[in-house]
Structure formats: C-alpha cells, structure tokens
Amino acid sequence: MNELKPIDPNYEARIRSSFEKQGVMKTIGASLVKIAPGEVVIEFSYDPSLAQQHGYIHAGVLTTVVDSACGYAAYTLMPADSEVLSIEYKVNFMSPARGETFKGIGKVLRSGRTITVCSGDVVAVEGCKERVVATMLATMISVVK
Amino acid sequence: MNELKPIDPNYEARIRSSFEKQGVMKTIGASLVKIAPGEVVIEFSYDPSLAQQHGYIHAGVLTTVVDSACGYAAYTLMPADSEVLSIEYKVNFMSPARGETFKGIGKVLRSGRTITVCSGDVVAVEGCKERVVATMLATMISVVK
Amino acid sequence: MNELKPIDPNYEARIRSSFEKQGVMKTIGASLVKIAPGEVVIEFSYDPSLAQQHGYIHAGVLTTVVDSACGYAAYTLMPADSEVLSIEYKVNFMSPARGETFKGIGKVLRSGRTITVCSGDVVAVEGCKERVVATMLATMISVVK
Amino acid sequence: MNELKPIDPNYEARIRSSFEKQGVMKTIGASLVKIAPGEVVIEFSYDPSLAQQHGYIHAGVLTTVVDSACGYAAYTLMPADSEVLSIEYKVNFMSPARGETFKGIGKVLRSGRTITVCSGDVVAVEGCKERVVATMLATMISVVK
C-alpha cells in the first residue's frame, strides 16, 4: 500500500535544510539522527527547560519532536517543489517522560498525492532501558510552494 | 452536565504554583492570564525560537500551551490532593500560526471523578484581528498524589 | 474565519440525494432533520439492534451518525461537482448513550478549498432531558467527482 | 511495557458472552474470529445495508467493528469483575472500504490498571488482496461492575 520510493532524489538535503530553519528544534536541542524513505528520527536530551510540573518532559515537547519527525517522514516522499504541513494529530501518553535522551520516530503509514498518514512514537532512553512514552497518529498535507 | 464548582477553594494558588514549576512555560515565555472554574487561559508572544521552517509558531508549541491550559482547566475542578495528567489529545491546525501574541484557551467539557474531557483553542492575535489557528480535544486524568 | 456561504445553491437537494444512498442510514433508521449552511442534524431512535453489551447505543453507531452529520455539514459548502470524504476523526464519549432519541449535530469549524474541519456532538434525548454523550472533531476532504 | 498476561483465566468466555449481547454486532453480521491475550479480531462481510453513498462500507461501521475489537483486546487483560468502556478514539481512513470481507484487528499497546491504550486496523479483503483501509488509536477504561 505504501509508496516508499522518493520522487525527489534530493529529499535528504531538502529535509536537513528545512530542519535548520525550525527555530524550535534549536530551542529543544534536537537533532536529525535518521532520514530514510518514509522514516525520520529526531533526538534530544533531557533538560529542565523542557519540563512540566513534575520534572518530566512536557507532553507538548514530546509532541513537537514527534510531529516534526512525522512531517519529515512524509516529506521524504513528496515532490521537490512541495511543502509539508500538519493538518492534525492525536497523541496518547503512555508513561511519564522520564529519561536521559528521547527519540521521536516518524513513519509513513500511507502516502497519497495530497494526504499522507503517519504514525510516530517517542522512545525514552534511561540507562540501557528503552520505553515508548507516547504514540502519535498524524495527517500531513502536501502543498505546492 | 458539567460540574463547574471547584471542590478545592484554593484551586487558583494550586495552579499558579504548578505552573511556576513548568520549565517549558518559562522557555516559551508563557504566562497565566485567566484562572476560572473550568477555564484557563495562557498567553505567549511570537519568538523565532518557537518557530517552524516557515517562521510560524510550530504546531507543537501551540499544542504545549493549549495542553497546559486544558490540563489546568481540568485541575480547577479536581480535589486538593490530586495531580492532573494528559492521557491523550487531538489537535487540528486550521491556519498558519502567524501573529504577535497567542492565547491558549482551555475549557472543561465534562468533568468526571477520574476523567475530564476538555476542549481548547489557540487564538492568534495580529494587530486587532483574532483568529483561531488550532483546536484541541483532550482527555485528562486525576491521580491521587 | 468560516466561509459559511454555500457556492452551490442546490446543496440541500445534493445532500438529500446522497443521504438516500447511504444504506447504513436506513439500517440505523436515521433521518435528516436539519440542513443549513455549515450545519446538518441527523436523528435516530433507540433500538436494541444498535446496542452494545450494556444495552446502550454502541459508540460506533453514535460515530456513524455524527460522522455523516459532519460530512454533510462540510458538503453544504462544497462545489456541486465535489464529493466529500472523511479523512479522519476523533470522538470522546462522555456519558453512556442512554435515551429514546439521539441527534448527531455536525458543524463546520473551518472551511477551506480542500480541507474542512468540523465539530460534532451527539445529544441523547431522554424524556425532556438532553445530554451531550459524545463529541467529535473531524477532518473532511473535498474531492472532484 | 505491555502486561499481556490475562489476570482472569476465563477471559475468552467473558468476551464471547459480552459480544453476544452487542445487538449491533448481529446487525452488522460480525463474528469473533480471534481472542488472544491483548488481541481480538472481528470479521464481517460486505453488505449494502452497511454502505455510504458510494457503496463502500461507511466509516462509522468500520469504526464500530474495530472499536469492539480494541475494547475486547483491552478486556482480555482486565479483571473478571470489570467492565470495559471506550473513553475516546481517533481513526484515519486510508482507502475506500471496498472488499468482500473486512477484519477489525484490535491490539493492546499499553495496559494499565485503569487505562488501556489500543491500536486497531481494519483490513479489507478483496479476492486474495488485503489492504489496511483504516487505523485506530483508542483509549479504554476499566470500570468495576
């Protein structure tokens, strides 16, 4: 069902350049750690400036990172002259976001001409233990620049 | 249907104290501008450190603020010895988040003993024009401390 | 923000004709009770053939009716040569769906060229009491026939 | 993370008995085809009485079946004296629901004492071809009878 063949061979450069422009990724201290057809991973480290009242990472920060991961996962499969926008998403929070580092993993579930459906996970890494702390289901749209 | 009578008369102090502990609210530069039974409003100003690739506020930052607004709206109606946690939320993005200031407005739709359902809006203020740029439907849970 | 002026003056006939083709609406015994620009209401009566294990209306049946109400609310504002499709929706269930009749109310929150965002409620009517038992946030797409 | 060990050894009988009481499952002609710890599959066949205006299965009918599959998947792990209720769900529709038979597959993502998070898929079977036509992310609650 999925069309995981990029139309634009330069998708990686296109995503790196877009990511650089996301001021909020610098604020979070996030970096792109994987860009593959239909999959993008973004990582960041724990910092109290990203926390909610109990000292865990705020749900919205987890959402920010996994939304960008899902958006860029969709963007790997979009044409060179397109922009990607989040239409909507839903996130479930499954455990407190406790950890040293966090990975937002975005994957394309179904890629269409206009609409792309993605699923995402946030994995918290604590010592050698990994745990899914949030899961996203998102709808992205391709807009001609 | 809604029980909008706070059980804990000190709900406002409880919310202000919790908000002060949210490191991410300082990072965003957000402040509490309204705390009423079943309704909380949080405001912040545009800053490039909160932006996505086109210079608009990142969807995840809008989500962070309206999630806190919804969570605290729910928290106004919870007992003094409780904590509020976001189980899940869904957000639709309706327009680019362009503006000078942004208000995250959280309201209780239905307050139960364990589960509270909230709706939220993010309003972008640009000059004298206000526009809803995002809308949230969220599920909060009350946990005994 | 909303463009609640129908482009197609014959939107009502177009919706009635589409509704007649929905076999599942006959199965549920549902009928269109309001068609206005950006708002549609569909009603049905309690029947054990629509129930879940406790005898209340199944969440999915509530969803079916309010999804059609939201889809047709979006469709009132779409061009004559378009089709409406549900891309996705989220529903919160706030009370057991107990009642004699049920109204699925769909309203357009934001109407765009391609994407329309709708909110919906299911109201249970029990004697002279009305109660919102479910609330929907939905994304509809306009597709050229 | 998941606790996929049933507490109640009689979970299968409990689910079969509950399913029998769901009037809407008879209306849809659905049957339980798999009950395993943390996973339930429900199947039904195409019928015009379940269709939307283009003759495909209505989004709400897909939702009904995959909601029951997710609810019962959660229920496999709940205590004998509990009830399962859907708090909320979100569904993305990825392709027209065209096919001869349809399988609603519900799986537990994370099982907690009160809250269980499930993911679900609806697979359309057309000849020897299978296609995911809808995907759900759902929150279930365990309530003491």
Image (tube, coloured by chain):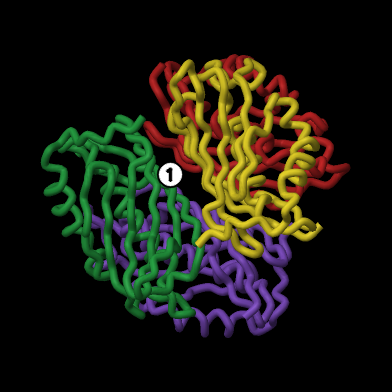
Chain colours: A yellow, B red, C purple, D green
User: Relative to residue A102, is residue D137 depicted above or below?
Assistant: below
Q: Is residue C93 visible?
A: yes
The total number of labels drawn is 1
Quadrant occupied by the N terminus of chain C:
bottom right
User: Which residue carries the number 1 mark?
Assistant: B1
Q: Outermost residue, front direction? A: A9
User: Relative to residue D6, is residue C68 depicted above or below?
Assistant: below
Query: Label 1 marks which chain's residue?
Result: B
Quadrant occupied by the C terminus of chain C:
bottom right
Residue B44 image position (x, y, % from top left): 75, 30
Residue B82 image position (x, y, % from top left): 43, 20
Q: Write the residue at 65% across / 46% down.
A: A71
Residue C38 image position (x, y, % from top left): 63, 67
Q: Is residue B140 visible?
A: no
Q: Write the residue at 35% across / 65% down.
A: C101
Question: Label 1 neighbourhood size at 10 Å, few (<14), some (14-19), many (20+)?
Answer: few
Please state if B38 lies on the left or on the right of D16 as rendered.
right
Residue A94 image position (x, y, % from top left): 43, 32
User: Relative to residue C62, is residue B91 depicted above or below?
Assistant: above
Q: Foreground: D58 or D99? A: D99
Snapshot quadrant of residue B28: top right
Q: Outermost residue, right direction? A: B127
Helix, strand or loop at disc 1?
Answer: loop
Q: Write the residue at 43% across / 52% down.
A: D136
Q: Amino acid at mark 1?
A: Met
Q: Write the residue at 48% across / 26% down.
A: B84
Please state if B7 lies on the left or on the right of B137 as rendered.
left
Snapshot quadrant of residue B39: top right
